[in-house]
Image (tube, helix red, strand yellow):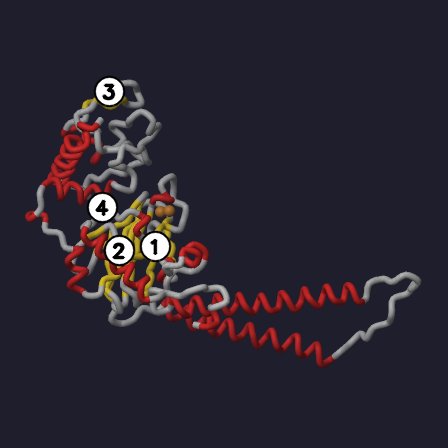
Amino acid sequence: MNWQLPLMLAQTNDSNLENLRERTEAISMQGTTVPDSSLIREGTSNPFVTEYWFPTQASSFAGEVDFLYMSIFWISLVFFVAIIGAMVYFCVKYRRKDGVIAPEPSSSHNTAIEILWSVLPSIILVWIFYVGAETWFEMRIPKENAEEIQVTAKQFGWLFTYEDGDQTNELHLVRDKPVRLIMQSEDVLHSFFVAAFRQKMDIVPGRYTYAYFEPIKDGVYRLSCNEYCGTGHSKMKTACIVHTSEEDRKNNTKWIEAEKTPFENGQRIYQIHCSGCHKVDGQAATGPALNLIWGTNEKMIDGTTELVNEDYVLDSIWYPEKHIVEGYGPVSKMNSFKGILDQKDVDYVIAYLKELKSSTGDAK
Ligand code: CUA
């Protein structure tokens, strides 16, 4: 829209949409892998706009939110210039001059001006309230045909459960299909935030919170936690992928355990449940890196060593406080996964760890 032009050098254009599509495909090919955050870039292909201005408007009310924001911005700017300008002008004009001892008398009252400066701001404020309330209602009242997606936030990752039972750690949506998110936290305060949707909602332990929106543009957007929730807060981000069709989405969310190898099943469990705190690139995070851990002797905080074998992995997943690796104490930051991952799931994780070690271990 034109009112944005002075600040926005360029709005979303076709080539940008094309870029987003390519990125979507790149990510789809990775299955449920969390994409590198460098893949997720919102806004326009103009780097200036991407860096410093709003990301693309990807939800039905994003345009209204931006309109209100820009309206308030320009109203503030106009009044700022007018008021400061008048102040400077009067300071100069009525400054104390040499030889003048008493100030010039000035009129104490001007009914026309007083009515003007009361009525005009009132009209503007009521208008801002009206537009704000209208947008707010649209953000807070779900559409009747909205699909429901369960969101579980935890230190430090996301789990999305769809109506058909599929689960992913990225949010997969369908363009033009309204969404109702039903959100819960496993531990502390988190906050759901997708800037491209202009939607943000806190996730509070011990209760449900909700977020509604309708994605109107396909592409890949950044989904992040917007409430400081611990040492891994800044890493608690994932992708929100808006597909063009339900079928497209299904291809990216369905997972049939029996058709996959133990390694693939283990990798998926790792991505959904572990990747928020454990890295597989050798970097220490909230927990130790897992890529080379299999078969090694790990030093514990009490000075003993433990061989990383099947029992060690099972214990670490079900009873995380049992073995605490040196440098990660004094108490375990991990919640028990007993009841979430059964022993078969642990088998898959073990297969994954073994494969990681043998495929990357030789390089060490
Ligand atoms: Cu979860 Cu910040």
Q: How far apart, in angstroms, are the residues tagged by discs 4 and 3? A: 29 Å
Q: Which circle's residue, 1 or 3, is located before the other in the chain?
A: 1
> Do the CB atoms of the residues marked 1 and 2 lie less than 8 Å apart?
yes
Which residue corresponds to mark 4?
A: 272
Foreground tag (2 vs 3): 2
For the C terminus, the quadrant is top left
Upstream in sequence: badge 4 or badge 3 = 4
Question: Which amino acid type is shown beneath numbered disc 4?
Answer: Ile
Q: Is mark 1 within 8 Å of ligand 1?
A: no
Residue 24 position in % (x across, y down): 24, 57
Residue at image location 14% in from the left, 29% down from the top: 310
Between the C-alphas of marks 1 and 2, the distance is 9 Å
Type of residue at label 2?
Arg
**What residue does disc 2 label?**
23
Callout 4 secondary element = helix
Task: Calculate the distance from the C-alpha at mark 2 to the C-alpha at mark 3.
Answer: 45 Å
Q: Nearer the viewer, mark 4 or mark 2?
A: 2
Apparent side of residue 324 relative to residue 167 in the rendered image (left or right): right
> Is the residue at mark 3 in contact range of ligand 1, meaning its CB lies under 8 Å from it?
no
Q: Residue 288: which quarter of the image?
A: top left
Q: Which mark is residue 305?
A: 3
Check if mark 4's residue and mark 2's residue have beta carbons within 8 Å.
Answer: no
What crowding class fits label 2: few (fewer than 14 Cα within 10 Å), some (14-19), or many (20 or more)?
Answer: some
- Pick whichever, 196 or 130, lies toward us: 196
Name the N-terminal-most of marks 2 and 3.
Answer: 2
Residue with the mark numbered 1: 41
